[in-house]
Image (cartoon, grey):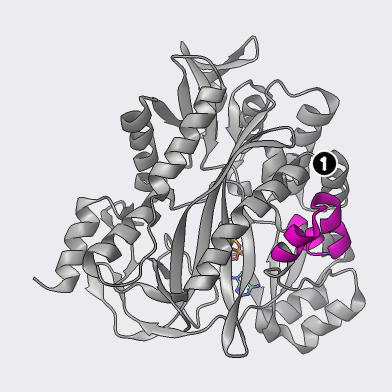
């Protein structure tokens, strides 16, 4: 049997699948071979997870910092999230003080002499995708290439164990987990495999609702969240990160209702704000980071992976954008891919930008990731060898109350490989492929 057929059999047997735009089901695009990635950078990214868990917990519990960061922002979406945050966490006391988070920190490699340095692209604090499919692609590569150096990746099990820990922290039996989802959702199977792991490994039942359905079906009784007779212990957001998820006031009312409830939220609006790009830019500043991370060794570990940011209120930075746009990326306060601006468009955009919008965008150093040659499997066909770059994601879970962390762990990894000359490649959008790292000494 050909390698591709073996791979496709594995993909369909183990749910490495997505809905296509036309509503049909097909395998998720994947890289035939695991892409080379330096072992020491993989270890470094894993080791950083507990540092960033601590940082995000500290940021999410600093109301002054969050208000100062988001107050001046013209962007309506961030303002609405901030208003919910202020209503729940500043004007009242939240009913639930336990937080559970599932983060994914994404990294590219930056060439540096004869080696490479890890550069953090962003940390996703809401709806980080591929919890399950990341484990499946690692299994697929291990099955196809058992002699390669493929780090173990039990992400799905570890994340569902973490969710089960959060469910237990709610301390009421016979309660459910609510997945808040988009509709249609092409990445439904990634989510459902988590629901299945919760049921089969922990006996925990879950259901799925869109924000519109939450508005119609969810009620608070003595601040506890109910759908009919079912009490919800945990609300896991796989939606709610994009303005498109809130087309009406009812959708915002639904978010507010969930946030007001005693259910443990994955994440709360405070952690959603803490993951936004404006915050990433702020803490890239040495003094700002000091406030959250007093330990200098810990700070140095984190700073070693920070890319340069160029706040737009500084005129020299805006000029830089006009003279060297190819060394920069301009990003809005948005999640979900496809929003960034590059090259000529970037220079044009900044020239025309209104002063009021400076805080709604971040200007970041462009990371020139090393290119490797490989073949992708898309729509059951193998491509020719082509130039590719790979982005490493490290998933981490974190159970906390106030600034105290009770559980903090890196749970697994995901490699996303995309065409080298395509600026952004979404896997669900079809420009990138699931991959896993072949840990090598050097590239
Ligand atoms: P989103 O929240 O939309 O996922 P990201 O910051 O992850 O935003 O950007 C999307 C993609 O753009 C990344 O996956 C990466 O491929 C590319 N990208 C983002 N920032 C940089 C950068 N500084 N240098 C090079 N590529 C980048
Ligand atoms: Mg991203």
- Residue 85 visible in the snapshot: yes
In-image side of 89 versus 188 (left or right): right
Q: Is residue 7 magenta?
A: no
Left or right placement of residue 391 versus residue 75 in this view:
left
**Quarter containing the N terminus:** bottom left
Question: Does residue 241 sit above or below 392 in this rendering?
Answer: above
Q: Residue furthest left?
A: 1
- Asked if residue 295 is positioned above or below residue 256 in the image, the reply reads below
Magenta stretch? 279-301
- Residue at figure coordinates x 33%, y 65% from the top left: 29
Residue 179 image point, x, y percent: 47, 34
At label 1, counting other C-alpha atoms closer than 10 Å, the crowd grade (few under 14, some 14-19, many 20 or more) is some
Q: Could you tell whether 232 is left or right of 351 in the image?
A: left
* Residue 418 horizontal/vertical position (percent): 45, 74
Front residue (pair 184, 386): 386
Percent x, y for residue 75?
77, 52
Secondary structure under the numbered disc 1 in the rendered image = loop
Q: Is residue 337 visible?
A: no
Q: Nearer the viewer, residue 312 or 232?
A: 232
What type of secondary structure mainly makes up the magenta span? helix
- Quadrant for ligand 2? bottom right
Q: Is mark 1 within 8 Å of ligand 1?
A: no
Which residue corresponds to the image point at 58% horizontal and 65% vertical from the top-left?
44
Per the image, the residue denoted by label 1 is 62
Q: In the figure, is residue 100 to the left or right of 333? A: left
Residue at horizontal 58%, vertical 58%? Answer: 47
Q: Which quadrant of the structure image shows residue 94? A: top right
Relative to 84, say whether 363 is above or below: below
């Amino acid at each position: 049997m050909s390698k591709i057929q073996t791979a496709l059999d594995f993909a369909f047997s183990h749910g490495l699948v997505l809905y296509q735009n036309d509503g049909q089901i097909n395998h998720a695009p994947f890289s035939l071979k695991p892409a080379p990635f330096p072992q020491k950078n993989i270890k470094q990214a894993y080791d950083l997870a507990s540092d960033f868990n601590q940082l995000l917990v500290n940021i999410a519990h600093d109301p002054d910092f969050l208000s100062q960061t988001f107050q001046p922002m013209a962007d309506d979406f961030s303002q609405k999230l901030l208003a919910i945050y202020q209503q729940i966490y500043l004007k009242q006391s939240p009913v639930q003080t336990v937080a559970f988070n599932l983060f994914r920190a994404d990294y590219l490699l930056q060439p540096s002499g004869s080696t490479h340095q890890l550069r953090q692209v962003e940390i996703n604090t809401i709806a980080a995708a591929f919890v399950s499919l990341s484990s499946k692609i690692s299994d697929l590569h291990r099955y196809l290439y058992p002699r390669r150096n493929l780090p173990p990746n039990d992400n799905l099990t570890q994340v569902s164990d973490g969710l089960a820990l959060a469910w237990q922290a709610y301390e009421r039996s016979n309660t459910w987990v609510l997945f808040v989802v988009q509709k249609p959702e092409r990445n439904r199977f990634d989510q459902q495999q988590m629901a299945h792991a919760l049921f089969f490994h922990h006996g925990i039942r879950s259901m799925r609702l869109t924000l519109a359905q939450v508005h119609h079906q969810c009620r608070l009784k003595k601040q506890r969240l109910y759908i009919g007779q079912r009490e919800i212990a945990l609300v896991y957001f796989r939606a709610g990160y994009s303005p498109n998820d809130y087309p009406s006031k009812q959708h915002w009312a639904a978010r507010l209702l969930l946030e007001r409830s005693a259910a443990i939220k994955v994440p709360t609006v405070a952690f959603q704000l803490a993951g936004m790009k404006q915050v990433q830019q702020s803490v890239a500043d040495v003094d700002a980071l000091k406030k959250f991370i007093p330990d200098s060794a810990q700070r140095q570990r984190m700073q070693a992976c920070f890319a340069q940011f160029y706040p737009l209120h500084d005129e020299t930075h805006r000029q830089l954008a006009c003279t060297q746009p190819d060394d920069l990326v301009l990003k809005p306060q948005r999640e979900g891919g496809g929003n960034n601006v590059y090259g000529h468009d970037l220079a044009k955009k900044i020239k025309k930008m209104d002063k009021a919008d400076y805080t709604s965008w971040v200007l970041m150093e462009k990371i020139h990731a090393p290119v490797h040659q490989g073949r992708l499997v898309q729509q059951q066909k193998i491509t020719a060898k082509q130039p590719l770059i790979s982005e490493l994601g490290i998933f981490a879970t974190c159970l906390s109350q106030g600034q105290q962390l009770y559980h903090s762990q890196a749970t697994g990894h995901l490699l996303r490989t995309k065409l080298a000359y395509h600026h952004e490649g979404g896997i669900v959008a079809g420009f990138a492929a699931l991959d896993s790292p072949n840990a090598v000494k050097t590239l």
